[in-house]
Amino acid sequence: MKRTGLVIAVLALCMMLSGAALAQTIEVWHIYVSNHQTRPTLDHAIERFEAANPGVKIESVPIVNDEYKTKLMISMGAGDEPDIFLSWGGGPLLEYVNAGKVWDMKDALEETGLKDNFMDVTLGPVNFNGGIYGVPLNNVVGAAIFYRTDIFERLGLEIPTTLEELYEVAEVLKANNIYPFTLANFNRWTGSMFFMYLVDRIGGPETFENAANRTGGAFNDEPFVRAGEIIQDMVDAGFFPPGFNSMNEDYGQSRTLLYTGQAAMYLMGSWATATITTENPDVLENIDFFLFPAVEGGKGDPTNMIGTPGNNYFSISNKCENKELALEFLRYMTDSTSAELLVQANAIPPFVGGGDLLTNPLMIKLFETVQAANNVQLWYDQYLPPELAQVHLDTTQAIFGGTMTPQEAADAMEAAAQRFYNE
């Protein structure tokens, strides 16, 4: 009996050890906190994946947007990177690729047929040297000026198509005690949208491309300086609410002014539609958008947009021990069920046929506007290496705050680029 009991105990221990060996955890880092439009899609994909793969656990790690890049950078530097991580593509991801941290999934995407799920344009920000280092899972995004149609109608305002007309609209709004724009620029990337659009409208997309890629351009070229001058003129003209540089976008301090009618316009990524739907759906019937107006004498096509064809990209680290399972999880995040959930959350799926699922007129208009854009410029702070992205954000906020002149800010950015590239 003792021997039988011992045998049973040994067998039980072996089964426990075998189960422990089979149990696998895939850690996923992302910015989809509880109120993020993509969180339900992610949670549902995790539930479906785990049900189909017993013994595999997806460990979801949500991190607040402004803290995310820093934590990921520290994790990568320490060699403790997560199995799957979110990025925005561009320069920061390329640094991790060059450091050997990211798996080139091109062959696996083609072999599994998963690559066919994506429009080719959406893979641009993660395509380096012929490899593919991530897939888009969130939203086709473009920045636009959302505005209160009821305020415009009440004051007889027309949509401005030039910077001069925008100033005229702003004067009427101010005369009626309404802030032309709401802006929470503590986060800095919010103010960066104004700067990026102005540089594009003044000099065209090649202005930034030449400076960033060091192909005959510099960050203190005239369009960058002129963009800063216009921003400071907007600040002096009262375009923004008092204290805007200390207001926090993550806490909705900008949107509150839009919701209450204290501000008429809001320059933001197209995810604003989902945010407004969640926070204040009643006001959505009085919201529409238009593109940033042209600058007189500028070279930029007024259909050009700032944004990304995929918004958030998920990559798999080279350190991940279960790359095939990780890729299989990403399939769940990009299947028809996820596409439908994204549409329900007022996102535009970056998948083939994603636009066909849209029914919301505002979302259809946004999708068509992005599709019709002559150029979609990836956000500077996502395109640039992290060191230069930080300088861009800091100097742009300083321009808004008046602590640097536009020339000083442009010179500081160019000096940082020369140091970074050892020029």
Image (cartoon, helix red, strand yellow):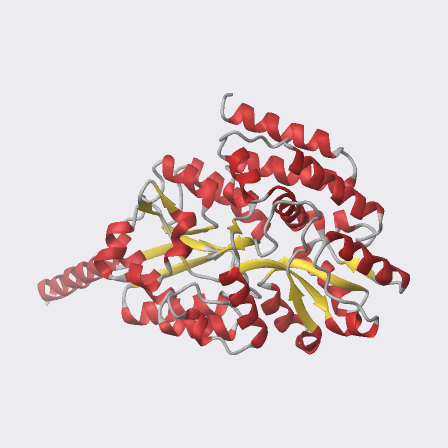
In the rendered image, residue 3, in percent from the top left (x then y), is placed at 9, 62
Indicate whether 311 appears above or below 224.
Answer: below
- In the drawing, does residue 84 fall left or right of residue 263? left
Q: Based on the displayed image, in which of its 4 quarters is residue 229 positioned?
A: top right
In the rendered image, residue 45, in percent from the top left (x then y), is placed at 39, 68
| Residue, far top | 423
| Residue, far front | 297
In the rendered image, residue 400, in percent from the top left (x then y), is placed at 75, 43
The answer to whether any part of residue 29 appears in the image is yes
- Residue at 30% from the left image edge and 59% from the top image edge: 115
**Which one is nearer the viewer's eye here, 296 or 66?**
296
Instruction: Give the tally of numbered discs.
Output: 0
Q: Based on the displayed image, in which of its 4 quarters is residue 233 positioned?
A: top right
- In the drawing, does residue 86 fall left or right of residue 285? left
Indicate whether 274 appears above or below 195.
Answer: below
The answer to whether any part of residue 37 appears in the image is no
Q: Based on the displayed image, in which of its 4 quarters is residue 10 positioned?
A: bottom left
**In which quadrant will I find the N terminus?**
bottom left
Indicate whether 96 appears above or below 215.
Answer: below
- Residue at 35% from the left image edge and 71% from the top image edge: 48
In the rendered image, residue 367, in percent from the top left (x then y), is placed at 51, 66
**Which one is nearer the viewer's eye here, 114 or 68?**
114
**Which one is nearer the viewer's eye here, 65 or 268?**
268
